[in-house]
Image (tube, helix red, strand yellow):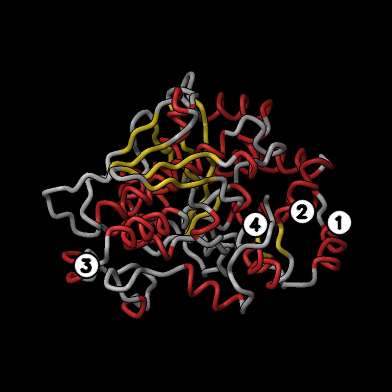
Amino acid sequence: MPGKATSRKPGRYADAVRSIWRHSDGVESRESVQRNDTVPLDEAARQNGAISQNEDAIRRDIVRYATLAPSGHNAQCWRFQIEDHCISILPDLSRRTPVVDPDDHHLYVSLGCAAENLVLAAQVYGFDGALRFSSASDGVVSVSLIRSSAIRPASPLFQAIPYRQCTRAEYDGRPLGSEELRLLQAAGTGSGVAPILLTGHESIEKVLESAVQGNTMQISNPAFVDELEHWIRFSDAEAVRTGDGLPSRATGNPPVPRWLGRRLFRMLFRPQPENDRLARHIRSSAGIALFVSNVDDRAHQVEAGRCYQRFALQATALGIRNAFINQPVEEPALRREFARAFAPADGRPNLVVRFGRGQKMPRSLRRPLEAVLL
């Protein structure tokens, strides 16, 4: 059940972060991260990885990298099944967020994010990493673990996995260079899915207008507020115990006991102050990426997740932050208007993401492998 205690022993929040957000021994040294917060490439690690581990440990480590993907409310709506020649990712419907995501769109996007991490890690460990998804397979995503004869060095995207985060804070407002935008566009483009990058003031203000509309609709919905509160981890102890949800630290708020956090949340979570904060966040960004698919089906939702994940990892490698502002695509009536304004004819806007340079925020946590392995 969501929020249930896991097998991880209680401990300090910082200790949990260090144990979760890391590269495996032999893949990359955390100390090699450069001061400018771009992600370096270790040539020895690129060539060798940690292939000397036994096969079971390798497969478990590949899954660990997959769990570092983002998910709505950090619900981690996935389970993993390790088989001889593949790893399958299954939707965990017990961790749905039915108010904000009634059709499970974001759930399947999250599976795509995890799948992209899994593919990148599998390739580093010497597997082909081919991905298969069929809507007829009950939503299961499978990644092949057939040994590859080709040596694939660890890519900058793989190197970035432990450093990626959704940074819910103001950015510095500086524009990105044309080469940075080109790299983000290329990383986020896939099969039937591509990002539309908006960097002009007028376009950003139009997105802000839609985001504020959606935000107001959501905060005015008691069911949405109840669901969001359920996934907030107000204290460090609660965040470490559950290993999921949205820690107060990650949203820029101090950790407090749950009884106090709930009272403060109910008192202070109001449309106007939240819209003011949303406006500051969006206006401080260098741009906004809209991930649009040609077709609105499960396969393209998974693909949208893969495209976003590559975009986010490429951004991380460049020292660029990003965060979701999905309100315009989470309210159905608003999504139709938003699509007419920004998406090509018949295109489905899947995700709205702001990006720019700024300071890192505290990290969210993850459940231990035992909680997600079948």
List the residue tagged with mark 4: 245
Q: Is mark 4 on a helix, strand or loop?
A: loop
Task: Give the percent coordinates (x, y) of residue 214.
Answer: 70, 38
Which amino acid type is marked by label 1?
Arg
Q: Distance between the residues labelled 3 and 2?
A: 44 Å
Determine the residue positioned at 69% across, 57% down. Answer: 4
Residue at numbered disc 3:
52
Q: Earlier in the sequence, mark 1 or mark 3?
A: 3
In x, y percent, where is residue 30?
A: 36, 76
Residue indicated by mark 2: 229
The foreground one among 229 and 344 is 229
Q: Earlier in the sequence, mark 2 or mark 1?
A: 2
* Rendered location of residue 41, percent (x, y): 25, 68
* Of callouts 1 and 4, the N-terminal one: 4
Contact, mark 2 vs mark 4 (Cβ under 8 Å): no
Q: Do callouts 2 and 1 mark residues in contact (Cβ within 8 Å)?
A: yes
Give the vertical position of 97 relative to 273 (above or below).
above
Q: Given the current orientation, which residue lies at the most extreme top position? A: 346
First along the sequence among labels 4 and 3: 3
Instruction: Tell me which amino acid carries mark 2.
Output: Glu
Q: Tags 1 and 3 in contact by the CB under 8 Å rule? A: no
Give the label, 1 or 3, closer to the camera: 3
Callout 3 amino acid: Ser
Which residue matches tag 1? 266
- In this rendering, would 271 be left or right of 70? right
Label 2, label 4: how many angstroms apart (C-alpha)?
10 Å
